[in-house]
């Protein structure tokens, strides 16, 4: 698709929270929060001419490498949220994108994401084949208080669950969708902490892709003062994903 005549380097998009996106207490699921953020990023790439459809001409796609989300509050059923997004940096095969979520003009979520250009045929990163100089970059305008980081993984922590990757776990790039990793781990968090919205922030590192029928193991450890918990997902001897949750 060509660059839209309505293209702007900062995009704002409204979403209404529906009941399928909510936990039993009526508030948005953390997984659906990530979905809304990702869909907003996709909408911005579409109007800017660097969408999945555009990139597939060159067998390319954006894949998420790291993501940090800081949460003041969660929206609830029937709330209309505004998500604003812009790009901090974009060069060659890498991009850092910022996102913020607002309800009634009040910021409730900040998010920083790190994306890589991925060749869907050879399954490797490579430089973006499309022009992107029309995007104004905002390196100083950060959406989170802290930037994303490399999560420290305790390789001695115990396994809590084994899983096989099913078709329902895959996305259009033919690997496990990034939100699925989060969903698998949150299923093993005390549900009271989720329903009480005790997650202050979470960070995810995506290291190796998972494919159909892969066998994986989920591991968990909690720090000594119980202010955070770390999950990892392994395939054989290799770590594919890490999640760090920080509690309020």
Image: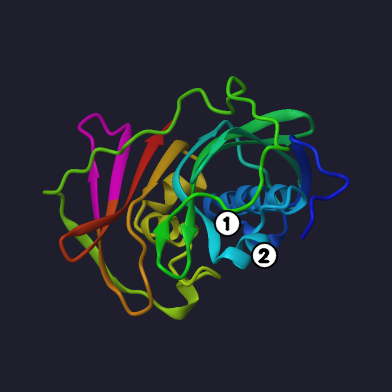
Q: Which residue is mark 2?
A: 53
Q: Earlier in the sequence, mark 2 or mark 1?
A: 1
Q: Is residue 32 left or right of residue 94?
A: right
Badge 1 element: loop
Dot 1: within a 10 Å radius of its alpha carbon, few (fewer than 14), some, or many (20 or more) residues? some
Q: Against 164, is 4 above or below? A: above
- Horizontal side of residue 236 vs 35, given as left or right: left
Check disc 2 and report its element: helix, strand or loop. helix
Residue pointed to by mark 1? 23
Q: Main secondary structure of the magenta part?
A: strand
Q: Is residue 191 magenta?
A: no
Q: Position of residue 122 (x, y in %)?
A: 40, 68
Q: Is residue 41 left or right of residue 158?
A: right
Q: Residue furthest top?
A: 140
Expressed as whole percent of the image width and height from the top left, the position of residue 171 reads 52, 69
Work out whether residue 67 or residue 174 is closer to the camera in this orientation and state it.
174
Within-10-Å neighbours for mark 2: few <14, some 14–19, many 20+: some
Q: Residue at the location (62% across, 56% down)? A: 22
Against 191, residue 68 (above or below) is above
Q: Position of residue 70 (x, y in %)?
A: 52, 33
Indicate which label's residue lies in the foreground, 2 or 1.
2
In the image, 219: left or right of 24? left
Residue segment shown in magenta: 219-231
Residue 137 at x, y percent in the picture: 65, 29
């Amino acid at each position: 698709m060509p660059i839209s005549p309505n293209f702007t380097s900062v995009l704002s998009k409204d979403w209404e929270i529906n009941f399928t996106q909510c936990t039993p207490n009526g508030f948005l699921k953390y997984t659906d929060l990530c979905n809304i953020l990702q869909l907003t990023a996709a909408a911005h790439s579409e109007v800017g001419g660097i969408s999945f459809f555009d990139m597939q001409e060159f067998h390319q796609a954006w894949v998420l490498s790291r993501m940090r989300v800081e949460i003041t509050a969660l929206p609830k059923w029937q709330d209309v949220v505004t998500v604003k997004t812009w790009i901090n940096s974009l060069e060659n095969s890498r991009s850092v994108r910022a996102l913020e979520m607002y309800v009634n003009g009040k910021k409730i979520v900040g998010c920083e994401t790190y994306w890589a250009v991925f060749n869907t045929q050879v399954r490797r990163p490579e430089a973006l084949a499309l022009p992107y100089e029309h995007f104004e970059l905002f390196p100083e305008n950060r959406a989170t208080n802290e930037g994303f980081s490399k999560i420290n993984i305790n390789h001695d922590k115990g396994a809590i669950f084994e899983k096989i990757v099913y078709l329902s776990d895959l996305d259009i790039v033919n690997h496990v969708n990034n939100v699925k990793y989060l969903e698998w781990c949150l299923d093993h968090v005390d549900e009271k902490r989720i329903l009480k919205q005790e997650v202050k922030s979470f960070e995810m590192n995506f290291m190796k892709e998972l494919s159909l029928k892969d066998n994986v193991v989920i591991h968990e450890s909690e720090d000594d003062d119980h202010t955070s918990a770390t999950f990892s997902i392994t395939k054989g001897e290799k770590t594919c994903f890490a999640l760090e949750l920080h509690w309020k």
